[in-house]
Image (cartoon, grey):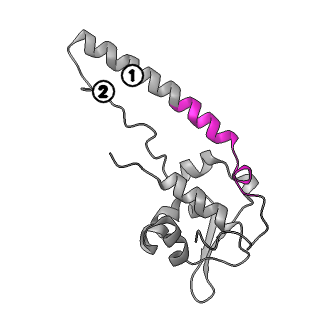
């Protein structure tokens, strides 16, 4: 099964954006995500709507952070990406007639809900500045971008 790496990809990009004074183009940032500029712009649209990034068109345009990293949590980015699915585990049938299947489905559902609550709580506790390397602006990341 293919994994959804959007959260990881976007976190990577946001941390690199913080290292540069100048705006970075969709082409440069898309390359760092291993995608094309149109997909990159669609992926970033929710972050722009939420006010975490801004983009300017035209010559000298590009993407910039709209807030300091310390004001952006992992949960905020996750939510701006429309809450990608955390788990791929599911029940066999939604309306099972078998009591065993009902019990299994209930146990899985309860366990997954509990795990999701814990993950979301933790995502809300971590800010992007906690993930940023202690390197000055512009001195890191050229090989990643």
Name the quadrant of the N terminus.
top left
The answer to whether residue 110 is magenta is no
> At 39% across and 17% down in the image, what residue appears?
107
Q: Which residue is mark 1?
A: 108
- Quadrant containing the C terminus is bottom right
Residue at 59% x, 59% y is: 12
Q: Earlier in the sequence, mark 1 or mark 2?
A: 2
Q: Which residues are magenta?
A: 116-133
Measured in 3D between alpha carbons, the distance from the residue under mark 1 to the one under mark 2, in whole angstroms, is: 7 Å
Note whether 31 is above or below 9 in the view shown: below
Which residue of the protein is positioned furthest toward the front in this rendering? 143
User: Farthest left residue?
Assistant: 97
Residue 137's spot in the image, x, y percent?
76, 70
SS at mark 2?
Answer: loop
Name the residue that disc number 2 marks: 91
Residue 60 x/y as whole percent = 63, 87
Q: Are marks 1 and 2 in contact (CB under 8 Å)?
A: yes
Q: Secondary structure at mark 1?
A: helix
Callout 2: 10 Å neighbours few (<14), some, many (20+)? Answer: some
Q: Is residue 52 visible?
A: no
The answer to whether 144 appears left or right of 85 in the picture is right
Q: Is residue 46 visible?
A: yes
Task: Give the side of residue 27 with respect to residue 107, left or right.
Answer: right
Q: Nearer the viewer, residue 4 or 134?
A: 134
Q: Position of residue 108 (x, y in %)?
A: 39, 22
Report the magenta stretch's main SS: helix
Residue 106 figure quarter: top left
As drawn, 134 above or below 130: below
């Amino acid at each position: 099964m293919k994994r959804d790496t959007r959260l990881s990809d976007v976190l990577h990009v946001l941390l690199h954006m913080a290292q540069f004074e100048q705006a970075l183009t969709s082409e440069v940032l898309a390359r760092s995500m291993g995608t094309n500029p149109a997909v990159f712009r669609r992926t970033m649209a929710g972050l722009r709507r939420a006010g975490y990034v801004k983009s300017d068109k035209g010559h000298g345009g590009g993407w910039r952070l709209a807030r300091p990293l310390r004001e952006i949590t992992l949960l905020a980015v996750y939510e701006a990406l429309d809450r990608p699915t955390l788990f791929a585990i599911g029940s066999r049938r939604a309306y099972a007639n078998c009591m065993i299947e009902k019990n299994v489905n209930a146990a899985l559902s309860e366990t997954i809900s509990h795990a999701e609550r814990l993950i979301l709580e933790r995502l809300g506790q971590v800010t992007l500045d906690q993930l940023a390397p202690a390197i000055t602006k512009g001195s890191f990341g050229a090989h990643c971008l």
